[in-house]
Amino acid sequence: MAYYSYECLDKNGQLINGQISAEGISQAVDKLKRMGLSVIDLKENKPKKKSSFFSNEKKPTITDLALFSRQLAAMLAAGIPVTRALLTLSQQAENKMLKEALETIHSNVEGGMNLTEAFSLYPHIFNDLYISMINAGETGGMLETSLLRLSEQLQKEKVLRDEVKSAISYPRTIAIFALVMFVAMVVFLVPVFQKFIPETSDIPAITQLIFNLSASWRNYYYIWIAAITAIVSGFILFAKSKTGRDLWEKNKFRMPVFGMLLLKTVIARFTRTLSTLLRGGITVVQALESAGPTSGSALVSETVKKTVQGIEEGRSIASTFEQSGLFPPMVTQMVAVGEESGTLPELLEKIAEFYEQEVQTTTKGLQALIQPIAIIVIGLLVGGMLVALYLPIFTTVSSSGGI
């Protein structure tokens, strides 16, 4: 699918600019003619690659999108036309990328493009879930309701992400602090202690190892920096490669403690998204196809693809979930009950609420567990370093008869 910028005249002779998606330029022209527009200029939009490192534009946050969705729903409920609502919200949007997108969406919708197609021009801002809900609301004449459900979904997604971030940020901060402290001690503290030890002293192996490490870091720092940079760069490139991503996907749920936290997070996100889509009036197949990629797990996406194939062959969702071995029995049983009783959206929401609570509980437990462990590790690091440095001094004083 390609995107084209057009300049046309409407039936009143007014000049209209906008964008349209089509398989080719001839299809784009046909679309514009069906909209009652006379084409003056039509050209394909070539994607511009921007370096995210140097770009000042920040992608809209979940909070930005949730606020926009709620505001648009409120304006539509007040009887304001969608084009005017989009124009107003584009003028007051604080995020530059979202502001520019809304301006173009307003222009396209005003030019005759449907809302779903206008939003789908910005997949880097509005994901599959967002587009599917807009499509369902626009098709079913319940856009306001779809936007409110979207807003609620995005708010819960933010809470879930914050819980996971809080669980990961604490040990990461402690690890960085411990590493910085260790490097500072080896580079600055070790040489000071080394001056107090006579060259004729018998130095223990652990102390000599620390002395050699300190001398190497201070004298050949450029080699260490180059080596560490090469290792980190290689690791990042591998992690971004298909092999690295596949390896991570296969093993991330097996990690001690954190693996279970990630699995609960993925299940909570997937079930809530699926529930939101089904409540929005979207068909089961379309809802699964949209919820899979937004789950944050390639394994879940693959399971969803198999589920869609199973549905087309007459199998149930629960049976495919059970065969995957990814979902806990509680999830598969509740999905089975939901399919049988026709209450699948409600039970999926209950599953999501349960696992969101589990994530919150696990996060608090991790923080309570990691704090004393971090203190012990830092204590052993500092204490072990000081003992190794003082040991030759004690040995020298003892051998000279000072003790």
Image (cartoon, rainbow, N blue to C red):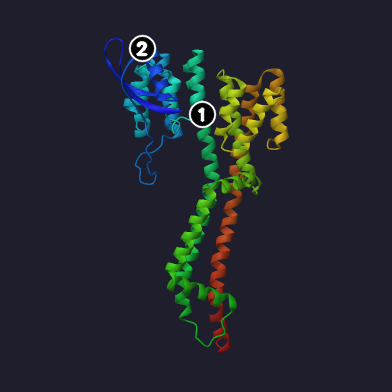
Q: Is residue 76 rendered to the left or right of residue 375?
A: left
Give the foreground label among 2 and 1.
2
Q: Position of residue 55 (x, y in %)?
A: 35, 43
Viewer-proximal residue among 269 and 129: 129
Q: Position of residue 287 (x, y in %)?
A: 58, 24
What residue is at 70 percent from the left and 36 percent from the top?
324
Q: Position of residue 71 (x, y in %)?
A: 41, 22
Residue 268: quadrant of the picture: top right
Could you say whether the residue bearing mark 2 is in a helix, strand or loop? loop
On-image quarter of the C terminus: bottom right
Residue 341: quadrant of the picture: top right
Alpha carbon of mark 2 to alpha carbon of mark 1: how far?
30 Å
Q: Amino acid at mark 1?
A: Asp
Residue 95 is at least partly visible in this image: no
What residue is at 56 percent from the left and 33 percent from the top?
293
What residue is at 42 percent from the left and 31 percent from the top?
64
Q: Which residue is mark 1?
A: 128
Residue 389 is at least partly visible in this image: yes
Q: Are marks 2 and 1 in contact (CB under 8 Å)?
A: no
Viewer-proximal residue among 326 and 179: 326
The vertical placement of 62 against 179, above or below, is: above
Viewer-proximal residue among 320 and 373: 320
Q: First in sequence: mark 2 or mark 1?
A: 2
Q: Which mark is residue 51?
A: none
Q: Position of residue 300 (x, y in %)?
A: 62, 35
Q: Amino acid at mark 2?
A: Gly
Residue 267: quadrant of the picture: top right
Q: Is residue 75 rendered to the left or right of residue 309?
A: left
Q: Which mark is residue 36?
A: 2
Circle 2 Cα neighbour tier, 10 Å, few/some/many (<14 / 14–19 / ≥20): some
The vertical placement of 403 against 34, above or below, is: below
